[in-house]
Amino acid sequence: MCIVAIAWQLFEEMPLVLLSNRDEFFARPTQSLHQWSDHSVYAGRDEKSGGSWLGIQQTSAGEQNGRWAAVLNFRDGVQADPEQRSRGDLVTEYLIGDLSPMAYARQLDLQAYAGFNLIVGDRQQAVLVNNRGYPPTPLFAGLHVLSNGQPDSEWYKCERLRGRVRQEVLPLIAENSERSYWQQAAYDVMSDRLKATDEQLPHTGMPIAIEQMLSPVYIEDGSFKDFGLMGSYGTRSQSILTMSVDTESINTEEAAKSNTAVTLHLSSRERTPLQQ
């Protein structure tokens, strides 16, 4: 499963700070963060389906237009239909398109995909949508934490990450927005391994023991070995995405209505599975 924390429009010079853990089977073939050769996309890539879970628009020359997107699976016990499209296509098609975040979210054929939570954005707007009853909704300025349930679900791992980001990361960014000043603190909170108690677990149709293994912000490789389920699974990558604004340029009316005065920076650190 996965988790994302988004600090949206909280800092004038850095209107987007996104922290993401991707949880996946280690056997699933994946390319780490890179510039794609077939699209103007900078992202990791699922080699099985061809899409991505988190990325930005960027040309091979490094030019950007401010578009970014992230997708998470929705965990409700409903099995994906093999005829459905890959959820990773939701990210790719937004990044290479030109529709606004809201227009893109509204035109999606929601039932063409297995359950998902999708966030798409640019300089002006970020929009959240899923295909489990949550309509396209602009994010308000604030801290948003999202995992594999409804956006308003108070899952243990979401509340755990929310509290730590608010207390340990956002104050550092407020002091100094240079990434080197706060990045290690961000990775530290993203690596929180504390599990929920049985009483704190969500009810998604999974056995309690599996729910508990999925409950930390960071899932350790091998967590499921004792159950003989899922194989080698855990947090495979941790990513930080920021949007920086050229405050001098953005003060012009034309720049304020475009994405020309912003720079996206996406970095990631990858994990390999433990030797069995």
Image (tube, grey):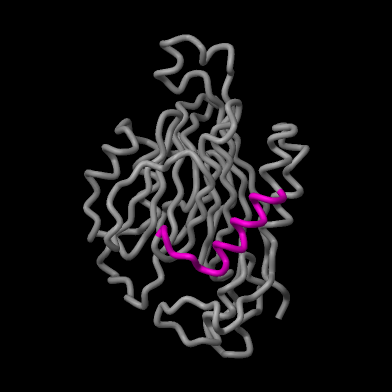
Residue that appears at 69% across and 69% down: 193
- The quadrant of the image that shows the C terminus is bottom right
Q: 35 or 22: nearer the eye?
A: 22
- Above or below residue 218? Residue 62 is above
- Above or below residue 187? Residue 175 is above
Q: Position of residue 78 (x, y in %)?
A: 32, 76
Whether residue 37 is visible: no
Residue 154 belongs to the span the image colors magenta: yes
- Above or below residue 89? Residue 75 is below
Residue that appears at 64% across and 48% down: 268
Q: 27 or 172: nearer the eye?
A: 172
Q: Position of residue 267 (x, y in %)?
A: 64, 43
Q: Taking 92 as reference, is 60 left or right?
A: right
Q: Taking 180 as reference, is 84 left or right?
A: left
Residue that appears at 33% across and 51% down: 129
Q: Position of residue 183 (x, y in %)?
A: 72, 44
Magenta stretch?
151-168
Residue 50 belongs to the span the image colors magenta: no
Task: Work out which residue is located at the far bottom of the displayed protein and give it.
Answer: 227
